[in-house]
Amino acid sequence: MLKDAADPDGMSVARAPKDFRPSGSDVTVTCQVVAREDLNMRVIMPMCAWNDGNTGALIGEIDPAVSSGDARDVDLAGLAERTLRIRSELRQPIS
């Protein structure tokens, strides 16, 4: 799902995709950091995605404290855990 997150319109991969399987999870979450350079300013955005055959989503986290920082400093494991919490909230039985 993250393959096309960076595109020719100024987005680039600032940190390569990495798979995470947080403790107790039965799903792999893939996370990366993308960057955009505009008006001589570089902004980064970490994102994670899952696709489990039943549901799939891409979650981007926008945090001013992170967006102007270094992509290497982003806690992707923490974002993977937050992404799984979002997944858990979304996957509710249809009644």
Image (cartoon, grey):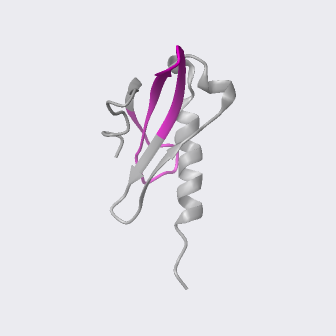
Give the total number of marks visible in the rendering.
0
Using residue 15 as the reference point, say whether residue 59 is left or right of it.
Answer: right
Is 20 in the magenta? yes
The image position of residue 4, as x and y in percent, is 32, 40
Principal secondary structure, stretch drawn in magenta: strand
- Picture quarter containing residue 75? top right
Name the quadrant of the C terminus. Answer: bottom right
The magenta segment is: 18-47
Q: Is residue 22 above or below residue 52?
A: above
The image position of residue 50, as x and y in percent, is 41, 50
- Picture quarter containing residue 90? bottom right
Residue drawn at x 65%, y 33% is 63
The image position of residue 28, as x and y in percent, is 40, 47
Residue drawn at x 53%, y 34% is 77
Residue drawn at x 50%, y 43% is 22
The image position of residue 33, as x and y in percent, is 46, 29
Which residue lies most toward the top here? 40
Which residue lies most toward the right here? 65
Q: Is residue 40 above or below residue 38?
A: above
Which residue lies most toward the front here? 39
Residue drawn at x 43%, y 46% is 49
Q: Is residue 44 above or below residue 41?
A: below
